Image: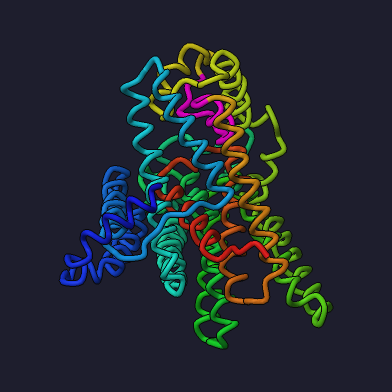
Amino acid sequence: MFNKIIEFTQNKTKYLYENSLFLQHIDKLILASIVAVFLSSTVMSSDVIGFIALITVFLTFIKIIFKPDERLDCKTFELWLLAYFMIVIISLAGSTLFALSLKGFFKTFTYLAFYASLVQYLKNNKAKTPILLGTIGVCVSFEAVIGFMQNFAQVSEISTWQDVSNLNPEQVMTRVYGTLKPLNPNLLGGYFVAGIPALYGLSAYFLNKKSFKSSAVTLGLALLSTITLFLTGCRGSYIGMMVIMTGMFTVSAKYLWQNYKQIYLSIVGGVVALSTFAILLSSSLRARVLSIFAMRQDSSNSFRFNVYQSSFEMFKDNWLLGIGVGNKNFREIYGLYMKTGFDALSAYNIYLEIAVESGIFALIAYLGFLITLIKDAIKFILKSTDTNAVIFVATALISICAVSIHGLVDTVFFRPQIQFVFWTMVAIARAFIKLI
């Protein structure tokens, strides 16, 4: 039905499209606005980033109305995503704090509308995928350089970012935070988890094109970004980085295992050994990694456990439709459940956050979207003979999985800097996946 309405509108506006320089170059404007979203993410506030994203959405809407042969379609995993969005709307309508929840809903709408815009753009512009990944890579590299410099400048903490009560002075880490707003090392760590796969993916892409110099430069930037990720002190991003490395080695095995088994095993063993040595060599990094397993003995871990317990109580009392989307909404109601002295901005787990905000069915729908997307992407990677397409889908899949695993222990996922990269990766995977 929607496509018939679109076709009718396009037929009526055909003359206008054929005689409009603006409309005939609208894809270039859309690409420019997408690039602007990524570039602004590094230094601008959330409101500015969201406004630029809405420009992309507006241009895409104009494109669908006027450009001939533009049509809408839906993959299986997008049906789950559509169900999730509809449940969020119902949750909004039933929220006791409607005004606050409405603000959160607008954010969700902006993210999903930006994703839909990317899907529509990539349908006829798959060749521009390296530009999208390259822009993400440039932004990640910029943050890596800034973060690396902050480490040597030994920047001071803006707030209490680590438990130093049981640490010797040499074990206290200088946690870098880059330029992302609000300034926070966990946000920078999550941003690296989402964006670093783009750099490794581009390195593989250039290598496949036999552009060895570009591949080496991109690989160097990826390694610098990986080092800076560890300097953030974000333990959740350490876990995300393990997912990235595991994903890269697993995908590369498709091409190296049969003919280059010894070289492949040597590379994997070398990376594992080097990583282990680096952790053991640095007392501050070693202490930070070991604190992951300290459970209640680390104040940050203990704080999260308390938040999980309180958030689960919130979910039990609002399991059907949730309390309404948005962190402001969450903070207002969390005060009724929190343990004294343990105020929180979020549930520190994206799945628990979704369940609390929009209910059990929203969580099921989101998990359905995620599982179906991952399954389709894996199937494509295993069966496809198009190396470039495999690289792009694998890059997107690794980023999506790493962000999703990181999300088990943090909710920086809901920040626009990470959201826009995440949905770009989903759109890239969607553009190349063909069920074989």
Instruction: Locate the C terminus and report the quarter of the image it occupies.
Output: bottom right
Percent of width and height locating residue 412 = 48, 41
Residue 163 appearing in the image: no
Against 361, residue 333 (above or below) is above
Q: What colour scheme has been applied to the protein in the rendered image?
A: rainbow
Residue 395 spot, x, y in % from top left: 58, 64
Q: Residue at x 53, y 67 (%)?
A: 224
Query: In the drawing, does residue 192 fall left or right of residue 304?
Result: left
Comparing 283 with 189, the one in front is 189
Give the magenta range. Answer: 342-358
Residue at the image point whose x is 33% and y is 31% from the top: 103
Drawn side of residue 256 relative to residue 93, left or right: right
Whether 350 is among the magenta residues is yes
Residue 79 or residue 34, whichever sits in front: 79
348 sits to left or right of 325: right
Q: Nearer the viewer, residue 76 or 389?
A: 76
Residue at x-position 43% and y-position 52% = 115
Q: How many marks?
A: 0
183 left or right of 281 in image: left
Visible residue check, residue 59: yes
Residue lying at 67% horizontally and 71% vertically, measured from the top left: 384
Q: Position of residue 52 (x, y in %)?
A: 27, 52
Question: Based on the displayed image, in which of its 4 quarters is residue 299 positioned?
Answer: top right
Task: Measuring from the top left, give residue 315's x and y in whole percent.
Answer: 57, 19
Up the image or down, 200 lies above or below 119; here it is below
Does the magenta-highlighted stretch encompass residue 396? Answer: no
